[in-house]
């Protein structure tokens, strides 16, 4: 039992490579709560080894060495500079990262940092996403079920950092059907403040921005992943493809005339860029 009260090894009691599971069976974790670590216990039963790293220097060193299958990191526990070092090292090693976040400006910056390196990334928003599902996606080398990275990589470089952060937040929240009040609660702000920030940054309402993000994620799921409209609607939290299309007709009418099955992700991205001007 280590200092965290867990059976998972920490920095001080790692099993040497020749005795342990080997680097291809290790999952690095940093900054996770005991509850979140418990979500990953089933991987130990599948012969993976959870390795708890306790300090940033060791984390960066271990990522740079490539001595693991993937790393699961708490965004709030990392500074911007530490996140850049982790992302750069992970990219150079081809190491996937799962970023566990709350909706904050720092977390949005960290997602943008990872997107800029084009590494393999999954993001789990606390209270919304399953950390276990994020790990499963990376362990099995599955393509992401949303277009978060693609959207973040397409945000205009000329935009101010706060605007890029807000758009990244919207892309995270807009992976599924979400109301503006729900978004405001997630980021611990008032609806009025959120409306003012979005209007100032993009000259649109939060409702319409979220609808556009859902439209982009849906186009990704159908066009890039080859999903059926029904499966895309289920993943989006809509009751049916009909409900999903009705949402788009109200908010992105010029781009929702085609049936969902004919959606094109590149065309949707071009339309979104034109919408924001």
Image: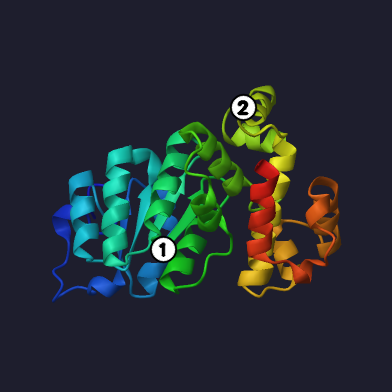
Relative image position of residue 192 (x, y in whole percent) = 69, 23
- 1 and 2 marks in contact (CB < 8 Å): no
In this figure, what is the number of numbered marks?
2
Chosen colour scheme: rainbow
Image quadrant where residue 207 sits? top right
Q: Is residue 218 visible?
A: yes
- Label 1 sits on a secondary structure element that is loop
Q: Nearer the viewer, mark 1 or mark 2?
A: 2
Which quadrant does the N terminus fall into?
bottom left
Q: Nearer the viewer, residue 223 or 9?
A: 223
Q: Earlier in the sequence, mark 1 or mark 2?
A: 1
Which quadrant does the C terminus fall into?
top right
The answer to whether 32 appears left or right of 253 in the picture is left
- Label 2 sits on a secondary structure element that is helix
Residue at (14% x, 54% y) in the render: 12
Relative image position of residue 259 (x, y in whole percent) = 83, 67
Residue at (37% x, 56% y) in the render: 117
The answer to whether 80 appears left or right of 188 in the picture is left
Residue 250: numbered disc: none
**Dot 1 alpha-carbon crowd within 10 angstroms: few under 14, some 14 to 19, many 20 or more:** many
Q: Say which residue label 1 marks.
A: 120
Relative image position of residue 21 (x, y in whole percent) = 24, 74
Q: Nearer the viewer, residue 3 or 123?
A: 123
Q: Nearer the viewer, residue 105 or 219?
A: 219
Q: Is residue 81 above or below residue 89?
A: above
**Dot 2 alpha-carbon crowd within 10 angstroms: few under 14, some 14 to 19, many 20 or more:** some
Residue at (71% x, 55% y) in the render: 215
**Could you tell me how far apart the alpha carbons at marks 1 and 2 are, in whole angstroms?**
30 Å
Residue at (66% x, 75% y) in the render: 226
Relative image position of residue 256 (x, y in whole percent) = 81, 58
Q: Say which residue label 2 marks.
A: 197
């Amino acid at each position: 039992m280590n200092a965290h009260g867990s059976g998972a090894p920490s920095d001080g009691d790692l099993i040497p490579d020749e005795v342990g599971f080997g680097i291809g069976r290790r999952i690095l974790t940093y900054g996770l709560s005991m509850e979140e670590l418990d979500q990953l216990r089933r991987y130990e039963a599948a012969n993976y080894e959870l390795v708890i790293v306790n300090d940033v220097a060791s984390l960066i060193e271990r990522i740079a060495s490539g001595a693991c299958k993937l790393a699961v990191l708490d965004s709030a526990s990392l500074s911007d500079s530490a996140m850049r070092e982790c992302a750069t090292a992970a990219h150079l090693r081809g190491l996937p990262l799962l970023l566990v976040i709350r909706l904050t400006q720092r977390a949005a910056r960290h997602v943008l940092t990872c997107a800029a390196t084009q590494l393999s990334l999954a993001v789990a928003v606390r209270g919304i996403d399953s950390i276990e599902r994020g790990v499963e996606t990376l362990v099995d080398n599955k393509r992401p079920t949303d277009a978060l990275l693609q959207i973040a990589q397409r945000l205009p470089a000329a935009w101010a950092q706060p605007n890029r952060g807000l758009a990244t937040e919207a892309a995270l929240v807009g992976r599924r059907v979400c109301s503006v009040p729900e978004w405001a609660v997630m980021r611990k702000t008032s609806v009025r403040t959120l409306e003012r920030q979005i209007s100032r940054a993009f000259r649109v309402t939060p409702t319409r921005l979220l609808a556009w993000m859902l439209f982009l994620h849906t186009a990704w799921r159908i066009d890039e992943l080859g999903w059926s409209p029904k499966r895309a609607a289920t993943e989006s939290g809509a009751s049916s493809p009909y409900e999903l299309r009705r949402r788009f007709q109200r908010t992105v009418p010029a781009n929702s005339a085609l049936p969902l099955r004919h959606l094109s992700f590149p065309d949707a991205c071009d339309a979104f860029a034109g919408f924001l001007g």
